Amino acid sequence: MAQVADTTSFYVGLKFRWQDGIWEIVEYDHHKMGRGGAVVRTKLRNVETGSIVENSFKPGEKFERIIYEDKPAQYSYRDGEDYVFMDLATYEEMRLSPQVLGEAAKYLVDDIEIQLEYFEGKVMGIELPKSVTMKVVDTPPAFKGDTVTGGGKPATLETGLVVTVPVFVEPGEDIVVDTRTGAYLERAKKGN
């Protein structure tokens, strides 16, 4: 029996069937219009092609929710364009394209354990852990008096992801990043 999702239960990452495809919510916003009704504005990613579209839905509109079967896997290495994973149950290698991975590819560091998301026998994407430890490869140096602003500075991480970090973070340090928001969480603890 198919599970149903409607616009009141939207959240980032929800996957549902719409217009002969499977789509994932990247962003959404409940928008109330003057005398008229409300709409739910969304940015959606087609999980098979990686294409992004924007669409507005009426409140209460219903969709078939896609529930994946999760299988544990570990990221091994990059081979050309593809990302290679090892299924932790069968030890088989699996190759996924950047289109299937979407934004998740920016968080893939060596040996990270993830969940492969299967639907109807096909890998539709991956689920990352809530946070990941990554090495800072480049960030501008801090200068005296910089702490007054209370802001941060951009830092490029080992995968090319750019995040805002506190001014005291230096190149070569390991930091913890939230994979849901892309935000800096903390310096990695020594020994992790």
Image (tube, helix red, strand yellow):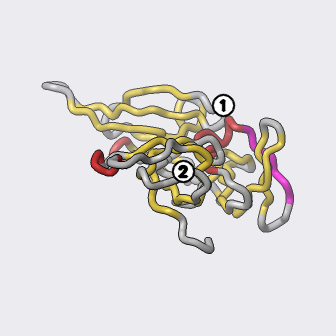
Residue tagged by mark 1? Answer: 49
Question: For mark 1, does the 10 Å Cα neighbourhood hold few (<14), some (14 to 19), or many (20 or more) residues?
Answer: some
Residue 8 spot, x, y in % from top left: 33, 45
Residue 41 spot, x, y in % from top left: 36, 31
Q: Secondary structure at mark 2?
A: loop
Q: Is residue 140 left or right of residue 191?
A: left
Q: Nearer the viewer, mark 2 or mark 1?
A: 1
Residue tagged by mark 2? Answer: 2
Q: Quadrant of residue 111?
A: bottom right
Q: Which quadrant: the N terminus?
A: bottom right
Q: Residue furthest front?
A: 144
Residue 64 appears in the figure: no
Quick check: marks 2 and 1 in contact, CB under 8 Å?
no
| In the depicted structure, whether residue 162 falls above or below residue 31 | below
Question: For mark 2, does the 10 Å Cα neighbourhood hold few (<14), some (14 to 19), or many (20 or more) residues?
Answer: few
Q: CA distance from mark 2 to mark 1?
A: 23 Å
Residue 121 spot, x, y in % from top left: 74, 50
Q: Is residue 135 magenta?
A: no
Which residue is depicted at the point 33% across and 32% down? 58
Which residue is depicted at the point 62% across and 32% down? 50
* Prevailing secondary structure of the magenta residues: strand
Task: Please report the bounds of the magenta region as a residue range.
Answer: 92-97
| In the depicted structure, whether residue 146 falls above or below residue 53 | below
Which residue is depicted at the point 45% across and 45% down? 164
Q: Which amino acid does the dot numbered 2 rest on?
A: Ala
Q: Who is closer to the viewer here, 59 or 184?
A: 184
| In the depicted structure, whether residue 173 falls above or below residue 119 | below
Q: Is residue 36 left or right of residue 142?
A: left
Q: Residue furthest left?
A: 35
